[in-house]
Image: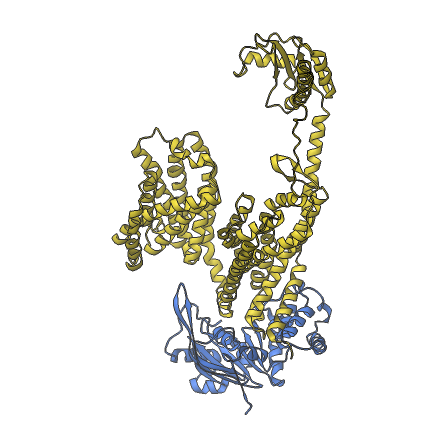
Chain colours: A blue, B yellow
Amino acid sequence: MSRLAVEAIGLRKVFVDPKRGKVEALCGLDLDCRAGEIYGMLGPNGAGKTTTLRVLATLLAPTSGTARIDGVDVAADPLEVRRRIGFLSGTTGLYPRLTPRETLAYFGKLHGIEAGELEARIGALLDRFGMREYADARCESLSTGQRQKVSIARAVLHDPPVLILDEPTTGLDVLASSAMIEFIESRRAAGTCVLFSTHVLSEAERLCDRIGVIFRGRLLAAGTLPELSELTGKRWLADVFLELVRRGGAAPEPEGVGVS
Amino acid sequence: MSRSPGARAFRVVLAAELLLLLRDRRALLLAVVLPTVLYPLVFLGQRWLETASRRAMETRTVVVACDVDALAARERLLELLRAEAPIDVRAVDASGLAPEDAGSAASIAERAEVARLAQGPDGVVLVAHATAGDPPVGLRLYFDGTNDVALQARHRVERALDLFQAEQRAARATALVGSDPARGLDVLPVDVADPSDAAGALLGRILPFLAVIVVLSGGSYAALSVFAGEREAGTLETLLVQPAPAAALVAAKFGAVLLTGLLTLFLNGASILLCLQRGLGALPGAGGASVTGLVFEAQRLFLGAFVFLPAAVLLCALLCLVCGRARTFREGQYTLLPLMLVCLVPSALASQDLEFDWLLASVPLAGPALALRDTLRGSLQAPVAIWMFVASSAWAGAALAQLARSLGTERLVQSESGQEEMAQRSVQSRYALRWAWVAVFLVYVLGGTLQAWNLPWGLFMTLWMLLLPLALLSARGTARRAKETVAQALQLVPPRFAHALAAICLAPAFATLAKIVFAWQRVVLPLPSRVAHGELLEGLANVPLAAQILLLAISPAVCEELFFRGALLSGLRRDLGALTCIAWEAVIFGAAHSSIYRFVPTGILGMVLTAITLRTRSLLPAVLLHATYNTMLLLDLERPTLVALALPGILLFAFVKPASRG
């Protein structure tokens, strides 16, 4: 079995919202993903997927519990963790007045990649994603699909061992989202660990080596699709999901929890 | 790697931010193009207009109708008048103008006669008439003081008369004593001020204020772009997962804002100085005369830039603080306006004749502004300047520290995730603010007009027939959106008895505080005498005391509280934190009193009343405090001994919890 790329033990995250008071977004969440594995986090809106990914990406500090990326503790050495992850979310934007080439150079320099090597990597990515023809046009003039490619190239520029994708297909049309899915699949062969969240069951069904179901800040179950089917006695992922949520102590609330 | 990740991130982010700003047409226009082109254009246009109108006036022929036969040397006077070309001198018979009523206003008949003799309102009439005493002849010049051409004619006649009188005086003196005894007593004023001191003094009066405006305008766009713009583009999250310390990112962004602000300042300064030095523009000098072709000393300008530096750092840090909290460009622009207004007040002190002392040197922005003024004048005192630099650097450092703290990663991401929700939520506060500005405007224009017409009725109508309906209309919209009744939105609920009592207890302390603030303010901002002498009360001298109390104490308390702490706060408190609500209330309540002299005292009162309403969740304590406070000031009831009542008042507010609602 390959080594652990992402590991979380008993993660808790409590927000203090001035208007709502204390909000417990994560209540003791455990997670483990291995190198070369595509792991899908499945859950309704507000289940804690985004919070989990943000804690792993060092954007939020956990209230308690530990998380390690590629063996590095997120609380102890956040900068080292950030070197080892590529992060992308559905709402990620680009600097409108930079070109794709400049965007890649900017983030490459922030990662401390040497000039010569940076140029070679940018060249390779421009070819790999077919971005040559618009490499020197400003990002504000690009189409949604083209921008998506720039964002993906930016996330893998420093060749991270772990990719964290927060609902990466949100807001994409069919073409762009299938390109994203192809990209995620391609990372498996490269030995990268891909951890992504979604509420689209078909994506998870098609891509994931393992699926973790998250509900109300807890991991209800995790495993391959056959394992989860066996556990719940249901065949389709949608039924598996509903069964897990039901067993998790609460029937899905009628509002806001619908699986889309 | 030799360089630390922090230093590397700082360099990379700063370069990228500057590149982004450089590619932003609006930023370039505001920071570079406008200042370099604006001043020459404004100065040139101003000069062109001035010379054009002056030339038109000077070349115009004016009619001077003369009846000076009573004068012995009349030929010489007419000669001198004709020398003041172009003058059309006409001999007329002005016997219709009676010389007796000296000093009284011209009658209609007199006015018509002058117009007839001068052939229109543009001309003037010069009459010499015989008098009974000594001297035997009196001269009188009739003109229409509202007519520019007639004034010009008067000016020329007076010049000729001055020469004529001097000649006559010298001639008479020579005839009497053999020589002119006044010879050698003419005064020729000689200004011994160093030319660069004089130029610096003129510039020092406007440059500090201008510098603050310029840094604010150049820096604000940059701050919006690097903070709010980054959020709006959706790149902030990406930036924060790069291996770079958050402090380095904030420092780089601040650096970009500071550089933009300083660049704008430099370009504006260079442009205005070049214009003044080349004589392209003029500054109003002493006595209202324009002064051109000023000489500036480079050394002073450099020193001036140096002493102003802490102010620029502070301004840019404040801009970053405000824009860093803004979730969108628009929200940032919205919050920048009050900041700018607040920053302009201390910097305006430099145009006043204030001494740059230790106390003022400690005040943020005021210290550097006064130091800049004195540097340009060449009168900067080194010890005070050094203290100013230390104090201002401390202010700037505190602002920077606050900036670094408030922009912690977690906070940025959290507020990012609530962006849409917040955008929706700010509907109520924006709605209430719009009504508030409308009210400020209407009170200024309509209320001012009404009160000028008739003070007691004007006040009554402004409060009860303008402000009250505005409050109800504004509250109705807020209530409808929040699915509440208007009374609920206005917080018209009975307060705790303890809170009502506490409000009354606080009034004496605030009445005394108001007097102190006024006294302090008078040092900084001298009151014009008509404001100082209670013009307001004079207009109400004939009104009975009970009506005065009703009009000046009770009515403002009820109507103003219903609008400001009722309708406005009702909208603000749904979207904004307590401190932001209090700040907005202070600015708008101060502005609503439409007087710069009342801005600070009313602003403070607005803050306190807002805090009390937020704490008690009822409007009535604020009404009570406001009414008691007004009455005490009106009847001059404030006594230092009563101030001690504030302590139980504060304790009651602090420890008695508000009644829970629904």
Q: Quadrant of the image for the N terminus of chain B?
A: bottom right
Q: How many marks?
A: 0
**Is residue A135 visible in this depiction of the protein?**
yes
Task: Say above or below: A217 vs B399.
Answer: below
Horizontal and vertical percent for residue B488?
Answer: 34, 51
Pick the residue in front: B113 or B643.
Answer: B643
Residue drawn at (67%, 72%) of the image: A105
Task: Say above or below: B10 vs B29.
Answer: below
Q: Residue furthest left?
A: B497
Task: Say above or below: B193 vs B584.
Answer: above
Q: Quadrant of the image for the C terminus of chain B?
A: bottom left
Horizontal and vertical percent for residue B95?
Answer: 61, 7
Q: Residue furthest front?
A: B177
Residue drawn at (33%, 49%) of the image: B509
Q: Residue furthest bottom?
A: A1
Pick the residue in front: B151 or A182.
Answer: B151
**Is residue B493 visible in this depiction of the protein?**
no
Horizontal and vertical percent for residue B525?
Answer: 48, 43
Where is residue A98, by image quadrant? bottom right
Where is residue A104, by image quadrant? bottom right
Horizontal and vertical percent for residue B170?
Answer: 68, 18
